[in-house]
Image: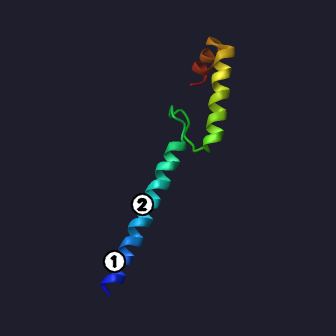
Amino acid sequence: MQSEQLRQRRREQKRLERERARKASRKAQMCASDELDFLMPRLVTALFGRGVRMSREELGDRLRDATKDTR
């Protein structure tokens, strides 16, 4: 009886650890600058970040000025 309870307790602990790991993984996938309020896969985040960086390099201050107007 005790061994069954011990196994159940271990299973529950492992389940909780997996759940915590999933939550941590989801949080890690969010945009690092916290400018976005939704989750994206890492590849999408990387591509989006690259696009934003390239746009900023190309447009320079014009992009910053345009984003200030919309906030």
Residue placed most toward the observer, 33 or 66: 33
| First of labels 2, 1 by sequence position | 1
* Quadrant occupied by the C terminus: top right
Q: Is residue 66 left or right of residue 19?
A: right
Mark 2, Cα crowd under 10 Å, few <14 / some 14-19 / many 20+, is few
Q: Which residue is mark 2?
A: 17
- For disc 1, the neighbor class at 10 Å (few under 14, some 14 to 19, many from 20) is few
* Nearer the observer, 48 or 15: 15
Q: Which residue is mark 1?
A: 6
Q: CA distance from mark 2 to mark 1?
A: 16 Å
Residue 60: x and y in percent read 64, 13
Kindly indicate the quadrant of the structure image that contains residue 17. Answer: bottom left
SS at circle 1: helix
Picture residue at 65% right of the left edge, 39% below the top = 44
Q: Which quadrant does the N terminus fall into? A: bottom left
Residue 66, numbered circle: none
The structure residue drawn at horizontal position 60% and vertical position 17%, both measured from the top left corner, is 64
**Residue lying farthest to the front in this orientation:** 3
Instruction: Give the image location of residue 8, x and y in percent.
Output: 39, 77
2 in relation to 15, above or below: below
Q: Amino acid at mark 2?
A: Glu
Q: Single out the residue that lies furthest toward the top.
A: 61
Dividing the picture into quadrants, the one containing residue 29 is top right
Left or right position of 43 against 4 = right
